[in-house]
Every structure is written in C-alpha cells, then in structure tokens.
Image (cartoon, rainbow, N blue to C red):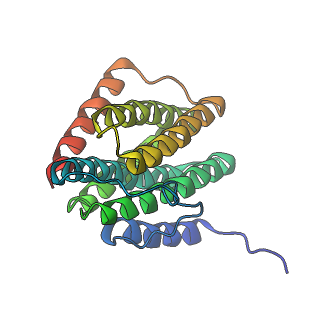
C-alpha cells in the first residue's frame, strides 16, 4: 500500500491536535524511550529536598512544553521538507522529556505548571514567526535555544541535592539530547543569532523559569 502524502491541511490539523494535547493535558505523553531513572533506587529525600527537586522538575517540564510548541510552530511554517522532518524528529525526543518529567513530578508528589497553556501558546507563536522569517534563521533560533537550555539544565544539576540520583539521571540525558538538537540545527544551516535576540531569549527564559518555579 502506498503511503499517503500529507497535505498542508493535514499537517495543520495534526499540529492543532498535538498542540491541544501538549498544552492542556497532563501525564498523557507516552515516551518512545525507557525512563532513565527506572532502575535506580529510591531517593530518601527530606521534605525540603523533595520540594526543591519538584520545583526544578516543574521548570524543566514547562521548558519541554515550550520546546514542543517551538518545534511545532517552526515545522508548520517551514518551507523545506527536510527542515520540517528534522523539527518533527527533535519534537519526538522532546516528548520523551515531557513524559520523563511528568513521571518524576509524580514521584516527587509535585505538579506541572498551571501556566503550561501560556508557555505553549507563546512559544508556538515565536516558533511560527521564526519559521516564516526563513529556515536559516529558524534553525539558528533552535541552536541558540538548545544552547541556553543546556546551560539551564547544568545549573539545575548544581542546585539539586547531591543524592537525588533519579532527577540527576533524567536531567543529564535531557542535556545530552538538547546538545544534539542544537548541533544538528547548526549543521543543517542555522545561522548565529544577533546579540539582541540572544539577550531577549535569555530574558524570556528567566521570566518563564522563575514563574514556573512557583506556579
């Protein structure tokens, strides 16, 4: 049987379905890869340590919601099939991250950010705009985003309790994936972002992370 070629309308409808599932549902994101902390022992965290770990993992989950939106928006407006496929592949790995963060949040008796729909919708618009500007800009935006995400994940490794091996293992795998996504975007032709855009991206990220820590 010949595979059906997706039309622009097909991709749009699939994108809308994916957007609604990501932004407005929780714990419904099946991972394609095994949970990194699956075979690790329980943590033995104090109440304060558990609360801190839960808040940091909530930030990470909110970041993955935003990443899904970014890739979805960029893929929707990209003019290049290869770029669109690359965005979709990265988004699938980000779905793993979503599922892992949700599982860890459950283990820590914590919850996802109540502002996830806001993070999604805002990032979707940014991604769609980047895609409309052009593929080189869009790929460069991905590369810079992933670079900042890796820095952010490394900072969480420094803040987590030293014996929270389960959270650390998840974050370390996420950081490896994000580094790979950024390198792939650069190799695909992503151009370096101007300094003002990099600064604006950092300020936007700070606003999201500081808010998601509490809400």
Q: Nearer the viewer, residue 197 or 79?
A: 197
Residue found at the very far bottom of the displayed protein: 1
Image x and y of residue 73, in percent = 45, 53
Residue found at the very far right of the displayed protein: 1
Image x and y of residue 94, in percent = 49, 53
Seen in the picture, residue 56 relative to 23 is either above or below; the reply is above
Q: Quadrant of the N terminus?
A: bottom right
Q: Nearer the viewer, residue 135 or 163?
A: 163
Q: Quadrant of the C terminus?
A: bottom left
Image x and y of residue 139, in percent = 54, 36
Give the quadrant of residue 190: top right
At x 16%, y 49%, the residue is 48
Query: Looking at the image, can residue 179 be seen?
Result: yes
Query: Looking at the image, can residue 132 be seen?
Result: no
At x 49%, y 49%, the residue is 74
- The mark total stands at 0
Q: Is residue 120 left or right of residue 93?
A: left
Q: Is residue 148 left or right of residue 119?
A: right
Seen in the picture, residue 103 relative to 139 is either above or below; the reply is below
Seen in the picture, residue 156 relative to 15 is either above or below; the reply is above
Q: Is residue 146 left or right of residue 63?
A: right
At x 26%, y 51%, the residue is 45
Image x and y of residue 78, in percent = 56, 48
Seen in the picture, residue 185 relative to 68 is either above or below; the reply is above
């Amino acid at each position: 049987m010949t595979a059906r070629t997706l039309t622009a309308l097909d991709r749009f409808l699939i994108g809308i379905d994916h957007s609604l599932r990501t932004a407005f549902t929780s714990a419904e994101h099946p991972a394609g890869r095994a949970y990194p902390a699956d075979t690790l022992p329980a943590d033995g965290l104090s109440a304060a340590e558990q609360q801190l770990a839960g808040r940091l993992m909530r930030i990470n989950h909110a970041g993955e919601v935003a990443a899904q939106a970014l890739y979805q928006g960029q893929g929707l407006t990209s003019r290049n099939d290869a770029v669109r496929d690359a965005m979709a592949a990265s988004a699938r790995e980000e779905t793993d991250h979503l599922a892992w963060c949700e599982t860890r949040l459950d283990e820590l008796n914590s919850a996802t950010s109540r502002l996830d729909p806001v993070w999604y919708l805002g990032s979707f618009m940014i991604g769609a705009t980047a895609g409309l500007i052009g593929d080189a800009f869009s790929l460069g935006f991905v590369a810079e985003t992933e670079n900042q995400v890796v820095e952010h994940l490394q900072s969480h490794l420094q803040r987590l309790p030293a014996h929270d091996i389960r959270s650390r293992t998840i974050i370390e795998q996420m950081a490896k994936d994000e580094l790979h996504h950024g390198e792939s975007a650069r190799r695909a032709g992503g151009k370096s972002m101007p300094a003002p855009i990099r600064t604006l991206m950092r300020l936007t990220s700070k606003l999201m992370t500081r808010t998601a820590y509490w809400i």
